[in-house]
Image: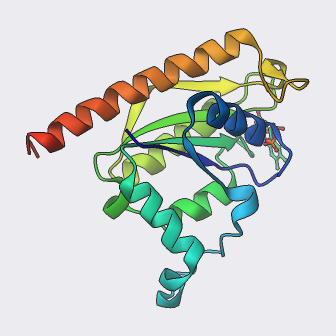
Amino acid sequence: MKILVISGGPRKHGRTAIAARFIERTYGFHTMDLSVMEMPMYTGEEEQANEPVVKSLRQAVLEADAVLLLSPEYHSAMSGALKNALDFLGSTQFLHKPVGLLAIAGGGKGGINCLNNMRTVMRGVYANAIPRQLVLDPSTFDYDTDGLVKEAAEQVDGLIEELKMYARIGQEIKAHQIT
Ligand SMILES: Cc1cc2nc3c(=O)[nH]c(=O)nc-3n(C[C@H](O)[C@H](O)[C@H](O)COP(=O)(O)O)c2cc1C
């Protein structure tokens, strides 16, 4: 089963990157980190489809059985970096695909608007954003180990278990040509 993580934080050494590295280490999922990918700004011009970074993002999402989106909450929404990357994608890559949503917030009850924003955009590309979702506040990070505190790691595990369940259902649907 292929689960693709898209790390939507533009800051190379930010908490979003820590969470993505933790997930990559723990679960071995392939990660596309937008802080290092140098995605161009989406213009809709046809030449952009030939850019290697655009091709690799499109191919990776297309091939994935499920996608996990990580984004910092910026002004009550997902990051511009993640929205820009998602603008290169659409239902061709996302149709019926299970997508897990994880927001990284600044504390003080942030994060829910980022999750809702990602959920709305996932509906726009006909993905299947799963019900379980998660916000990670600064206090949930273990900066010494470049990871997460135990409770947060368990919550991530719950999110990933649900994502895997929907990915398995998706595989069954494909295998039996139900759609
Ligand atoms: C431009 C900007 C806007 C932000 N807006 C919010 C917000 O609306 N809600 C929130 O909880 N945190 C907000 N934050 C805090 C970030 O979500 C938080 O610091 C997060 O860890 C940033 O991700 P990073 O560590 O991967 O860079 C904002 C930060 C920035 C730079």
Q: Residue at x 81, y 31 (%)?
A: 106
Q: Is residue 106 left or right of residue 49?
A: right
Q: Residue at x 59, y 25 (%)?
A: 134
Q: Is residue 113 left or right of residue 166?
A: right
Q: Is residue 89 visible?
A: no
Relative to 66, say whether 111 is above or below.
Answer: above
Relative to 148, say whether 54 is above or below.
Answer: below
Q: Considering depth in this image, is 164 or 14 the residue closer to the camera?
A: 164
Q: Residue at x 83, y 19 (%)?
A: 139
Q: Considering depth in this image, is 114 or 50 the residue closer to the camera?
A: 50
Which image quadrant is residue 37 in?
bottom right
Q: Position of residue 39 (x, y in %)?
A: 66, 70
| Residue that lies at the very extreme toward the top in this rendered image | 151
Q: Position of residue 89 (x, y in %)?
A: 45, 64
In the rendered view of the protein, which quadrant contains the N terminus? top left
Relative to 88, say whether 157 is above or below.
Answer: above
Q: Position of residue 90 (x, y in %)?
A: 39, 62
Q: Position of residue 59 (x, y in %)?
A: 43, 64
Q: Is residue 167 left or right of residue 113?
A: left
